Image (spheres, rainbow, N blue to C red):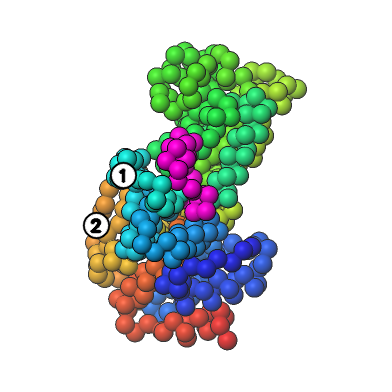
């Protein structure tokens, strides 16, 4: 896989040897068990896979290259390049500005953006309408287009489904930038709809089977289906794709559900005429991170700390998985570990910031699960671990702990 040039301050002298060691032992990525590093009073149980993925490193390399190559020019990002506050703040500190926020609201008026400006398309991609707007302004975007290759893979699947006359069901969060981009590209290929979960899938399934009034489709999914969607005609052949950061298990459940609906309505012999077996279209990093988190659930621990941007979809899913077994704290950096007996953290479901006291158990030795999303720098993970260790001054130093774990000689 290609190696990218990313700023050294995103790297970690503690995390890098762990990742390199695991890669040397398991180059085919068949072992998802965690790495355990014992610091004496604190035992860190670190996920097998976490942190920057291929698409994020590609986007970071392109963004910093744009800064280097365009000194004196105004440089804009369509929206947050990735969902991590450390990365986005550093880019802003270097003079970059946003055109839109993560909800699609205007920050910089379009009339203020000209052909003399540089515009970076984020890793999530963008809609066809924005692509056309930029082109109409004479803005060249190909050179600094950081759209993740795995997002583009989803768009290619949408194209294939459309070519074969399947309507497209997108499993995603409708307001997420990636889902907005995918919906735009998908709608250009075929009739499309965005659903958020299995419950919404069942609404559509009941409509297909005639168990529910078809008018419910237009009210329940208002604003989330493509223009001219006709329930009678456009739910006869369907295929499922997804936002690349959704939970694989949920997408699989949705896809299998629609397959069962089509078998029930049309029979097993006719299934290929009504259902496209697309598998899921998750990116490799999302799959690896989720599989690694499932392995974490086989461990015994006192708590879990999940690190990443609070608007990061893939990180929120890791936090949800951890919370099925551990007391879990979703934080965006070391500053959230306020002190030994207080932590600030985020509840993604309610979009609320919480403060918890006495989050570290009063015991001789604690076990802490640690992981992060695909847009979180390794340096931030290390800083969170350092902050945690600072509450236990008698801990073993990092070099000694890595040697004891067999990571370094």
Image quadrant holding the N terminus, namely bottom right
At horizontal 54% and vertical 39% (from top left) the residue drawn is 242
Instruction: For marks 2 and 1, give the CA distance.
Output: 41 Å
Q: Position of residue 389 (x, y in %)?
A: 35, 76
Does 129 lie within the magenta span? yes
> Is there any visible trace of residue 97 in the rendered image?
yes
Principal secondary structure, stretch drawn in magenta = loop
For label 1, the residue is 112
At horizontal 60% and vertical 44% (from top left) the residue drawn is 153
Does 145 lie within the magenta span? yes
> Is there any visible trace of residue 44 in the rendered image?
no
Placement of 142 over or under 267, stated as above or below: below
Magenta residues span: 122-147
Placement of 391 over or under 247, stated as above or below: below
- Mark 1 residue element: helix
Q: Position of residue 226 (x, y in %)?
A: 49, 25
Placement of 78 over or under 171, stated as above or below: below
- Mark 2 residue element: strand
All told, the count of numbered labels is 2
At horizontal 62% and vertical 70% (from top left) the residue drawn is 23
Image quadrant holding the C terminus, namely bottom right
For label 2, the residue is 355
């Amino acid at each position: 896989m290609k190696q990218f040039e990313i700023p050294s301050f995103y790297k970690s002298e503690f995390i890098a040897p762990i990742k390199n060691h695991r890669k040397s032992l398991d180059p085919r990525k068949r072992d998802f068990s965690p790495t355990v590093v014992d610091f004496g009073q604190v035992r860190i149980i670190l996920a097998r896979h976490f942190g920057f993925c291929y698409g994020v490193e590609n986007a970071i390399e392109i963004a910093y290259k744009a800064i280097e190559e365009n000194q004196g020019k105004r440089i804009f990002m369509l929206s947050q390049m990735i969902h991590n506050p450390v990365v986005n703040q550093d880019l802003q500190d270097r003079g970059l500005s946003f055109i839109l926020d993560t909800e699609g609201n205007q920050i910089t008026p379009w009339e203020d953006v000209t052909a003399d400006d540089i515009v970076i398309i984020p890793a999530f991609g963008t809609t066809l309408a924005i692509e056309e707007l930029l082109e109409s302004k004479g803005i060249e975007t190909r050179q600094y287009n950081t759209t993740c290759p795995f997002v583009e893979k989803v768009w290619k699947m949408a194209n294939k489904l459309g070519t074969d006359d399947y309507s497209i069901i997108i499993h995603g969060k409708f307001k997420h930038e990636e889902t907005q981009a995918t919906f735009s590209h998908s709608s250009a290929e075929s009739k499309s709809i965005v659903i958020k979960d299995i419950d919404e899938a069942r609404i559509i399934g009941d409509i297909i089977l005639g168990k529910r009034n078809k008018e419910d489709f237009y009210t329940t999914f208002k604003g989330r289906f493509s223009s001219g969607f006709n329930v009678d005609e456009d739910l006869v052949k369907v295929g499922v794709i997804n936002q690349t950061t959704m939970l694989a298990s949920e997408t699989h459940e949705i896809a299998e559900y629609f397959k069962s609906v089509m078998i029930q309505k049309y029979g097993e012999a006719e299934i290929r005429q009504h259902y496209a077996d697309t598998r899921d279209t998750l990116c490799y990093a999302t799959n690896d991170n989720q599989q690694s988190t499932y392995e974490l659930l086989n461990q015994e621990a006192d708590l879990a700390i999940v690190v990443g941007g609070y608007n990061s979809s893939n990180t929120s899913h890791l936090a949800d998985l951890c919370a099925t077994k551990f007391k879990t704290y979703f934080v965006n950096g070391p500053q959230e570990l306020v002190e030994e007996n207080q932590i600030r953290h985020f509840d993604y479901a309610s979009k609320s910031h919480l403060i918890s006291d006495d989050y570290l158990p009063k015991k001789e030795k604690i076990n802490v699960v640690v992981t992060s999303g695909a847009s979180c720098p390794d340096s931030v993970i290390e800083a969170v671990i350092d902050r945690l260790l600072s509450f236990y001054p008698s801990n073993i130093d990092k070099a000694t702990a890595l040697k004891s774990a067999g990571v370094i000689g």
